[in-house]
Image (spheres, rainbow, N blue to C red):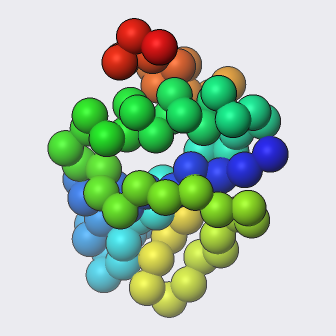
Amino acid sequence: MGYVCMTDKAMSGWGPCRDKLNLYVIQCDTEDQMVRIERTARLRREMVKIHRRDRCPRNTSARLVTLKTFDQVPGWHADPVGG
């Protein structure tokens, strides 16, 4: 299991993330899931600083973590590069 993490520029700085970065994190169970999420994230202009972690990041005074599981983000499952 691992986590694909990315900064969401669209959600950072307002609402619950006022004065913070929104770190969008997707928990994956397999390498294939991580590859699919990374590929999709790189196609989205609002997602930057995409990276993997072995542990889930935590909220800090400078960031709010939005944690989702692979199953909670079905729109991210497609393989946009064609495999």
Outermost residue, left side: 45
| Residue 28, horizontal then vertical, whole percent | 70, 39
Q: Residue at x 19, y 44 (%)?
A: 45
Tell me where residue 42 sits by quadrant.
top left
Tell me if I can see residue 11 in this picture.
no
Image-quadrant location for residue 34: top right
Q: Position of residue 14 (x, y in %)?
A: 27, 66
Residue sitting farthest toward the top: 82
Where's residue 16, x and y in %? 41, 66
5 w.r.t. 81: above or below = below
> Is residue 14 visible from the viewing direction of this image?
yes
Residue visible at 36% across and 72% down? 21
Q: In which quadrant is the N terminus drawn?
A: top right
Q: Quadrant of residue 26?
A: top right
The residue lying toward the viewer, choosing from 79 and 19, is 79
Q: Is residue 81 left or right of residue 58?
A: left
